[in-house]
Amino acid sequence: MDNGNKDPRTYQIKNPKIEGTTLDLLLDAYYPEMRRIGFVLEALHALPITEENGRVTTTGNYSMRVEGGTSFLVTGSGANKAVLEREGIVYIEEIDYEKGEYRASGEARPSRETLIHDQIYHARPEVNVVLHLHDQVALEYGRARRTEHAIFFANRNDAQEVVDALADENYVELPEHGQFVVGKTIDEALAEARKHHRDARGRQVRTESFRYIMSAAAGIACAFLVQGFSYVIDEKVRNCEYYNNLDGTVTYTCPVEISCGNLKNWEGEKEVMQVDGKRACTYAMNGSS
């Protein structure tokens, strides 16, 4: 029977075959590194704080493969992964998809994305670390491959969609939800998460700078109109290329018929006629009025 659409929240938990003493040794070995992952992801604001049953917790989750197989340790549902405690770790020995059962051990319950972790470990034998982030900056401003659907409660079919979208890359986005990041090592996975966050943050800064300039330019346009100037900001948006110079100024490269307006040379603003016949207008982002 195909239970690919079975809700993972209804899976039953069965005792694993591993002995308790061996599990304690695994936790001793892996816990410090899993806790380190949480510290780093919290610094990226990739594990947003929330509240569950009156307790402070965090969204997102992450896991590490247990060496030599497809079993893994994963942060449990309701755990504060930013300051992870041993009680917040769940050992997943195997998952029976037909019966809808976890062979697992831990005080916490497996998170709703555990099936995705499991499918990635089965599909990508070189992967030893899986991170599920809720990086809101990357979600809004990132440029990454993505799943076709917004996945929130990942059944087996959903988990397979994530694996397919990830393919042989290390980063994939779940629309309206978050991201999955994988790596051979902890440092490789964290570096991938940092890279996408940094790139998205750069786009956010450029976008917000553009909005600021548009707002300021609109005010300048009104002043020009009062003084009898014909400065049309809509034309500037439609026909000019925008570039953030990262030095407190931005430059619009426009058709020559669009005037730069009244520039403040003491703020570093200037007008340059380019060899391609276009006019480059440089404005200060935070100059005095």
Image (spheres, rainbow, N blue to C red):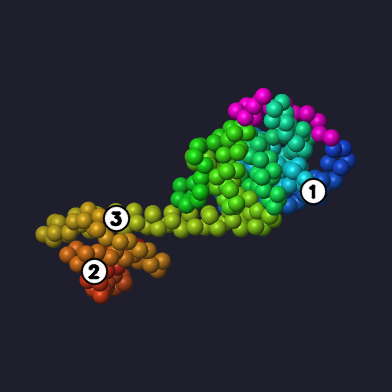
Instruction: Report the span colored magenta.
Output: 1-17
**Location of residue 184 in the rendering, given as x and y in whole percent from the top left corner:** 68, 55
Residue 278: mark: 2
Residue at coordinates 60% horizontally, 28% vertically from top-left? 5
- Mark closer to the chain start, 2 or 3: 3
Q: Is residue 190 left or right of residue 28?
A: left
Task: Name the secondary structure under disc 3.
Answer: helix
Mark 2 residue type: Lys
- Check if residue 16 falls in the magenta segment: yes
Closest to the observer, 150 or 31: 150
Residue at coordinates 70% horizontally, 27% vertically from top-left? 98
Residue at coordinates 25% horizontally, 72% vertically from top-left? 276
Task: Name the secondary structure under disc 1.
Answer: loop
Dots 3, 1 in contact, CB < 8 A? no
Q: Can residue 209 be seen at all in this image of the molecule?
A: yes
Residue 173: mark: none
**Location of residue 107 in the rendering, given as x and y in whole percent from the top left corner:** 76, 34
For the residues labelled 2 and 3, the Cα–Cα distance comes to 20 Å
Residue designated by label 1 = 68
Closer mark to the observer between disc 2 and disc 3? 2
